[in-house]
Image (cartoon, rainbow, N blue to C red):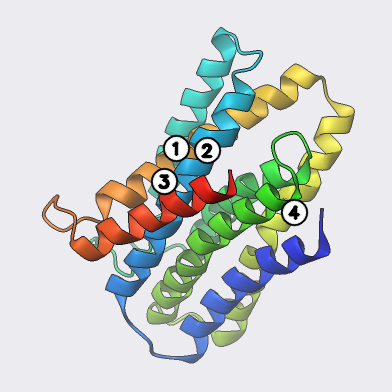
Amino acid sequence: MSFWIIILLISFPLAGGLLALFTNYRSEHRLKLVLSFGGAYLLSIVAFHLIPHIYEDANFLTGVFLLGGFFFQIALERYSRGIEHGHLHLHGEKTKLIPYEILFSLSLHSFMEGMPLGTDVFFNYTQKLSFAIGIVLHELPAAFAMISLLKAAKLSTNILRIFVVVYASMSTLGALSSRFIIHSADDHVFDYLMAFVVGTFLHIATTILFENSENHRFSWSKIWAILLGILLAVIIS
């Protein structure tokens, strides 16, 4: 995996977390526009590259694992509180925050996001770089939302710094792990694993696009962000 892709995967979520840690910046609307752009971009990359690849030699189990990833992500959000979508509050929930539960669920999601980047099966270098950009456009606001929420819950600054570093490293670790898996596991095992990961992408991307709309209507700014995300994915395909 390229050095510059590793820098990209680490620096963006790190920047999002540090921005929340050291400033009082609040603009959920702008975060949602970035998420909408990244969500549309990621969904397009999934449709143009990942799904065609996993269905080249697909069978019934491919669909099972894809659906498994989709519903696994739903279960994961029970613990992450939807921070992947840029949520900055708990919508009136009275459930006590469990910081390490949030970190673990978000880190697991980020780990899986990085896995397709660890092989040369899905992308050439340019496409791999573009896919990495799609991931970090999603992870930057997610890191910002996580640290903002935990900062408001009065976690210590030192703990928050550790959380930022751990989360920022997860996509890279996921990419490195997939390089090991593809060389040590049967091809079908890796294909099923990728189908599972694609299922999580489908849930995240579609939830970002549709859950963040106000009164179930898209603003023009969000429509333009979505169209630009799709256009960029078409250009690099």
How much space separates mark 2 and mark 4, taking CA atoms? Answer: 21 Å
Q: Quadrant of residue 12?
A: bottom right
Q: Amino acid at mark 2?
A: Val
Tag in front: 4 or 3 = 3
Q: Amino acid at mark 4?
A: Leu
- Per the image, the residue denoted by label 2 is 46
> What crowding class fits label 4: few (fewer than 14 Cα within 10 Å), some (14-19), or many (20 or more)?
some
- Per the image, the residue denoted by label 4 is 173
How much space separates mark 3 and mark 1, taking CA atoms? Answer: 5 Å
CB within 8 Å, label 2 to label 1: yes
- Per the image, the residue denoted by label 3 is 205
The earlier-in-sequence mark between 2 and 1 is 2
The earlier-in-sequence mark between 4 and 3 is 4
CB within 8 Å, label 3 to label 2: yes
Residue in the picture at 82% in, 53% down:
1
CB within 8 Å, label 3 to label 1: yes
Q: Quadrant of residue 92?
A: bottom left
Instruction: Where is residue 82? Give x, y as percent.
Output: 37, 55
Tag in front: 3 or 2 = 2
> What crowding class fits label 1: few (fewer than 14 Cα within 10 Å), some (14-19), or many (20 or more)?
many
